Image (tube, helix red, strand yellow):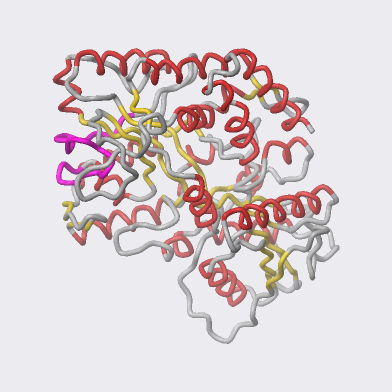
Amino acid sequence: MIAMKKTSWISVCLLLFLSACSPSNSDQGDSKPSQESTIDETGSNSAGPNSEESNGTEAPDESEPAKLVFSTYYLTDQLKTAVTKYEQLHPNIEIELQSGTASGKDLNDMLLNQEKYITTTNTSLLAGKGPDLIEMDLFPAEKYMKRGLLVNLDDQMKQDSSFTKENYFSNILDYSKIDGGLYGAPLYFSLEGLFGDSEAISKTGVEFDDKNWTMDEFVKVMKQLKQTGDRDYAFNGIPDDLLLSMAKENYSTLVTVSNKNSNFNQTEFANMMKQVRSLFVDGVVYDIYKEKGLPTAPGVAGSGGTYMDSYFYEASISSPGDYLTNTSASYSNPFMGKKFTKPKLYTKPHPKNAESGSYFSTFGTVGITSSSPHKKEAWEFLKFLMTDESMQSYTDNEGRGFGLPINQTAYNKLVQQLEAAGTIQTANSTSVKVDSASLAALRDYILGATHHVNTQSKFNEIITKETKAFFAGQKSADNVAKLVQSKMNLYLNE
């Protein structure tokens, strides 16, 4: 929501990387090789699921052969390894990995390949010919839910006596639900927050409760910091990026979802647009585009802008190491001005009348299709991907990987690994001490995460495209919000 936003091509590359599914530690041995195929333009694949039926509520018959098709846009070696290990453990199960073409000669080519994958996979699902399992990060789960295309995994979890929900970060699962149902299980997640210099903020005399502040209160605090403090800005940013982040983080307020119809809140969005513009007009936020470049510091490559001091910057926490680094006084973020003397993680503001809590994004979200003839086998494989053994192998020796694991045992192993090491090295070669008290605070922050950040590509596209006229002064907030509502409702209910 706030501070420096990465360019579009970086976001795309990260999306490709993070859309991977869970890895596994294993010896590949002499098992049968997993089949792999790509989706053709009609949405079909070289070898689809079998036709035999199953309701997915009883234990799978280990003597009966079954073939599962798993579709993911970006196919990783880690997922291949997980499949190999699972097939070794279950000789009656064959898993075909179906993927798109994630490479390309340039960014436009990559985006075209991604769009082709989305279109053809969507066509298959609507025709009842889709895969058994699908990695959902690129797809609109709520639209599929309304059409009855996905299995409610919450029912699977409740009916499976071998599944212990308490072994996972259950708040992440619960707050990833749509209209009361869980239609995709995230394997990883990240926390979205604001890092601020608590000592510098304290010196301004401005007081606030970040655990409970609303967007209106947040804007007021940012303006007070600008007026009373000695730093140049409250934070750095780009108008349309800031608005998009706010819209994604407040998706549940902007969009009302039900089985019958979904509606985009035009009035709320218009107010949000006005709030964002006021932050830049009043000089509270450093406008990167207006100042013709990213803020730069001595020794930091940039595009020629002025290096500005601020009280906050935005960060995604995808590992315990990320948190320790950003809360260390010895760490110098290249997009901060003065080094923070006492860094602290602050919660982003929430909408009016919404419950308090921090924000999180999910990755590697796996769903089971309603058309699958092997729902019970698909559920067993998804459970395997969620095990601590399967999730542990994707991390490096400082606990960095695709994200924070949904499995608490896997997370605890990362923490123990860091505590045993004693220190971690940052990207700028700074040594950061591992502090157990800080890690305990991170766990509390994770357990307090209640706001799921929406990452639907079409939602992002509509917001970004249609609001440019507002920031250019060509249309009013109300007119743009009305247009966005029309396009969003058409998309959500088509």
Q: Which residues are magenta?
A: 328-346
Q: Is residue 285 left or right of residue 130?
A: left
Q: Quadrant of residue 232?
A: top left
Residue at left 64%, top 32%? 462
Q: Nearer the viewer, residue 38 or 126?
A: 38
Q: Is residue 373 above or below residue 297?
A: below
Q: Nearer the viewer, residue 404 or 281?
A: 281
User: Looking at the figure, which quarter contains the C terminus?
Assistant: top right
Q: Quadrant of residue 236?
A: top left
Q: Is residue 117 left or right of residue 325?
A: right
Tell me if residue 229 can be seen. yes
Q: Is residue 99 left or right of residue 374?
A: left
Residue at left 58%, top 49%? 365
Tell me if residue 93 can be seen. no
Residue at left 36%, top 38%? 293
Q: Nearer the viewer, residue 399 or 306?
A: 306
Q: Is residue 126 left or right of residue 466?
A: right
Q: Position of residue 341 (x, y in %)?
A: 14, 35
Magenta stretch, main secondary structure class? loop
Q: Is residue 98 above or below residue 307?
A: below
Verify whether residue 354 appears in magenta.
no
Q: Quadrant of residue 314?
A: top left
